[in-house]
Structures are given as structure tokens and as C-alpha cells.
Amino acid sequence: MAGNITRRNLLGGLAAGSLLAGCGRSRAPRYFGWLFVASAGERGIAVADLAEFRRVTTITMPQAPQQILLAGSKVFATCPDARAVCEIDPARFTVSRRVSLTGRIVASAVTPGGNLLVIGTDRPASIHLIEVPSGKVSKTIPLPDAPLSLDASSDRAAVTAGNAVIRILLRDGKLAGSTDLGLRAGIVRFRNDGNSLLVGAADRNQIVSVDAATGALLARMPLAFLPQRFCFASDGGQMFVSGTGEDSIAIVSPYQSEVDQTMIAGHQPFGLAMGSTQGRNLLFVTNLGSGDLSVFDIDTRGLASSVHIGGKPGEVLVTPDGGYALVVDRDTGDVSVVRMTVALNHERTAAVGQGTKPLFAVFPTGSAPQSAVIIPRPA
């Protein structure tokens, strides 16, 4: 008796056919790289070959991994329950080094130059600075409260804890000051020039901007929803915000400290990513409520394409060449591959009289994905 035909099996078979034969069409261009997915369900890093869109192995971790960090050519993964940061050899798919910490990891960031990992822990509440070349903890800085979110610039780190945003001098390894925001602080990000901080409230519809050097509160920006995820345009001139409570995203002008526009972005916008395809600057938004991927043209702020993914689309990544968008299902870890030339051009196939489907392939990684990164490799 034939087994049940699943969505993954069906699309995987169709993708294999298109990769090998393409029904007479030219072979789709490949992107040579690896996709690393931190899987809590498998307690490891699932690795997929993006040139073939298939999973190749799983790197076993000491405990469930949470965040994958790229620091120059090095790859790290945080394991909160193991109280450790593991360095991964991307060529051999093995853990090459383990850095043990005194607290449970709750947040992490990498400095822009990739020379320093900034790790926030609770029990005890601290910031740990790890030198990337040596893997050594150079400084541990006590915090007054457990950190929730953190970010790093070239010379500073910022941590949200309780009602405050705390500034840290990385060179000196000490606290520079704390600003009481008058609200419960959530996500924090540096503006591209490192001169100001943008903090999303965790208990109200608001973003607060703070001077990174002095800690002075600059502005309060009201939103239509609770902010949870930030994504910057490549030039840093716009910041896109998604959250809960509305079918919309906000476009923030970080240098003017104002909300420029709020626009509908599908049903329950979630993951955000920037990419460039065919000379167009694009914003990719996953829609949890409808199972779609919405693609917006940043210059016109109009909808460029919408692709039905199905399931629960979470994080979205774009290959550096702009050829493919990769959507990771929040539950299963299945990755849906969208070929952007087809999604944007709406090509039609005369032989079948209908549109060529932009959903190019689906392949598995690992269940309960926590984060994902694309790592280029030689062709």
C-alpha cells in the first residue's frame, strides 16, 4: 500500500524534477552555501546544502542550541542549559571549542568587526565578553538585573533589564550608565552609526530612542502594536518593526526618531529580512496567520509578491545573491525555498497554461528551530 503523500514529499519530488530536468526549462541557478539551523528538538545544528536544497547532517550539541552567531569567518552557537558557547568548524561540521560560562545564557550579540562575542546571562545576571580569536572570556561584568535583550556596536554594548537600558563600555569592560525608561524594556538595537539606541517596550505599543553616549532619552514613538522584531535597511536609514496585535508593520526613521509609516503586511506579520533582487531593494515578511511570505518593494513601499508557504512560517533568510528566500517553519523546521526571479516576474508556462510556481522546493532541517544563518562556501 502506498504511504501518505505529504506536502514535503510532494514538493521535494517536484523540486528534484525541476533541478534535474526542469521539464525542458533551463536549470535554476545555484547558490553555493550552507544553511545552519539551531534545532531544539534535535539538540543540534541541522546543516543543509543550499546548492542542492537538502539536509546533509546534524552537528550534535551538549544541550539544545539557541542562537547561531557569525563572527567573521567563525561560527558559534549558544547552549543556554549547558551554560556554554560552542565554536563550530563549518568545514568539518564539528564542535571545535567550548567556552563555559557561570550563568544561563539569555541573550547574545557580536561586535560589527566580529572580534568580540557579548553574552548575557542570568543566575547570576552578567555580561561576558569573549575574545573571538582565542575563545577566552576577557571580562565578566555584573548586572543589576537579568538581561532580556542586548546589542553591540564597535565600542559599546546595550542591555535591556527590567525598566532600564544599560550601556557598557567594551574597551574598559565596565558599565557606562543606566537609563530608566518608565516602562518594561524589550528588544534593543543600535542605530547603524552607533550613536543612539532604539528600545522596544515589552508592555506597551512604543519605541524609545536613547543617546548611546550619555543615556539621555531622546524620543518616544507610539506604535499600533507591541514591538518585538526589528530589521534595518542596508543603509540604516529605515527600520522595519513587527510585533503582536495588528496585521501591520511600522517603518521607523531612526535618524529622525519618528514613525514614518504603518502599513498592512499580511495576516500576523512575524519574521523580517532585507534583500536585493533584480536591482530592487526588498523587505521579506512572513505571515503566521495565513502561511504566506509577503515581499515589499522598499522604494515604492508596494507589495511586490506574495507566496503561499503553508504551515507556520517563522524566520526568513535571503541568499546573498538575492536568488532565493528561505522560510523556516516555526514548528517542523521545514525550509520552503522561494525562487525570487519567478516570484517577482510571475513567469507563465505555455505548456500548462498557468503560472510557474515560485515555491521551488521544501526540505527538512530540525524541529523547534531557534535561529538560522547562511554560510557561503566556494563553488
Image: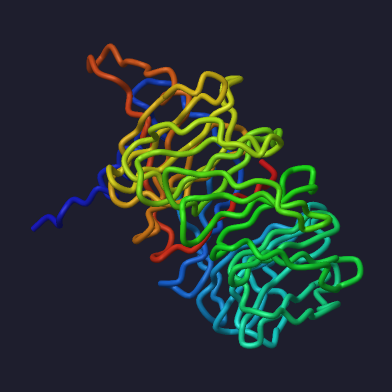
- Horizontal and vertical percent for residue 330? 38, 57
Q: Is residue 251 left or right of residue 363?
A: right
Question: Which residue shows up at 65% across the image and 46% down it?
Answer: 219
Residue 14, image quadrant? top left
Above or below, 114 relative to 40: above
* Residue 61: percent from left, percent from top: 56, 77
Q: Name the residue rendered at 50%, 61% in the picture.
A: 202
Tell me the colour scheme of the image.
Answer: rainbow
Front residue of 317 and 361: 317
Q: Residue at x 81, y 60 (%)?
A: 156
Specify whether 283 is left or right of 75: left
- Displayed quadrant of residue 321: top right
Extreme-top residue of the structure: 350
Q: Image height check: is 348 above or below 27?
A: above
Residue 283 x, y percent position in the rendering:
52, 33
Q: Residue at x 30, y 44 (%)?
A: 291
Furthest-right residue in this view: 172
Horizontal arrangement in the rendering, residue 80 relative to residue 334 (left or right): right
